[in-house]
Image (cartoon, rainbow, N blue to C red):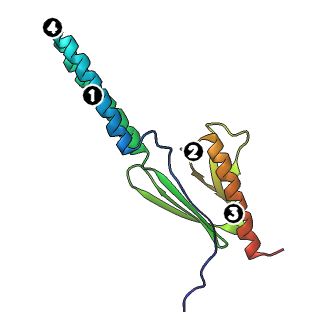
């Protein structure tokens, strides 16, 4: 026998905000490379050959900084709320995955207010808490907390109609 399809009250994938797309990164690096090359030619014509090497080091440093930023942006968390459970699936920047399932009836959505950069959005069950959306801005955390609370409230009402 097959189980009846569960109603999904919230299915959200949380990802960090991107500073640039891959295409935008390529365009920015091309502009920087052209500017450094032209400036380097000017210094080379004046006899300051070592400046070209320093411009090359600057290009490598800028490229490395963007690459590190892009690696951090691979992180994501998926939150699914049904009447039975809240399922969390987190993938970190290295691709490691963690999963958790919390009964909706006993889960609490906690966010200390006023919301500040060091305030974490948590899903709590008993003495265990899962922090989600660490990469979200305070306003995004507050907005997502409201949506998550509404979804949990709706899911609980399915289990115990008023």
Earlier-in-chain disc, 2 versus 1: 1
Q: Residue at x 61, y 37 (%)?
A: 117
Label 1 residue SS: helix
Label 4 residue SS: loop
- Percent x, y of residue 72: 42, 43
Label 2 residue SS: loop
Relative height, residue 100 to residue 6 (above, below): above
Mark 1–mark 4 distance (CA, rounded to whole Å):
20 Å
In this figure, which residue is indicated by the disc labeled 2? Answer: 136
Relative height, residue 58 to residue 44 (above, below): below
Q: Nearer the viewer, mark 2 or mark 1?
A: 1
Numbered tag placed on residue 151 in the rendering: 3
| Residues packed near mark 1 inside 10 Å, few (<14), some (14 to 19) or many (20 plus) | some
Earlier-in-chain disc, 3 versus 2: 2
Q: Nearer the viewer, mark 3 or mark 4?
A: 4
Mark 3–mark 4 distance (CA, rounded to whole Å):
68 Å
In this figure, which residue is indicated by the disc labeled 1? Answer: 33
Mark 3–mark 2 distance (CA, rounded to whole Å):
19 Å
Q: Nearer the viewer, mark 3 or mark 1?
A: 1
Earlier-in-chain disc, 3 versus 1: 1
Q: Residue at x 67, y 67 (%)?
A: 104
Would you say residue 127 is visible in this rendering?
Answer: no
Earlier-in-chain disc, 3 versus 4: 4
| Residues packed near mark 2 inside 10 Å, few (<14), some (14 to 19) or many (20 plus) | some
Mark 4–mark 2 distance (CA, rounded to whole Å):
49 Å
- Residue closest to the eye, 122 or 22: 22
Outermost residue, bottom direction? 1
Earlier-in-chain disc, 4 versus 2: 4
Mark 3–mark 1 distance (CA, rounded to whole Å):
49 Å
Q: Residue at x 70, y 69 (%)?
A: 155
Left or right side of 159 for 82 = left
In this figure, which residue is indicated by the disc labeled 4? Answer: 47
């Amino acid at each position: 026998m097959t189980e009846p399809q569960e109603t999904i009250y919230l299915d959200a994938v949380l990802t960090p905000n991107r500073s640039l797309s891959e295409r935008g990164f390529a365009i920015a690096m091309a502009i920087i490379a052209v500017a450094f090359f032209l400036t380097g030619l000017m210094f080379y014509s004046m006899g300051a050959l070592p400046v070209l090497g320093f411009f090359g080091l600057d290009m490598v440093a800028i490229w490395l900084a963007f690459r590190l930023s892009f690696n951090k942006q691979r992180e994501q968390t998926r939150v699914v709320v049904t009447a039975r459970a809240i399922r969390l699936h987190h993938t970190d920047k290295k691709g490691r995955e963690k999963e958790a399932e919390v009964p909706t009836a006993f889960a609490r959505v906690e966010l200390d207010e006023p919301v500040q950069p060091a305030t974490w959005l948590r899903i709590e069950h008993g003495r265990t808490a899962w922090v989600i959306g660490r990469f979200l801005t305070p306003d995004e955390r507050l907005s997502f907390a409201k949506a998550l609370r509404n979804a949990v409230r709706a899911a609980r009402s399915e289990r115990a109609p008023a």
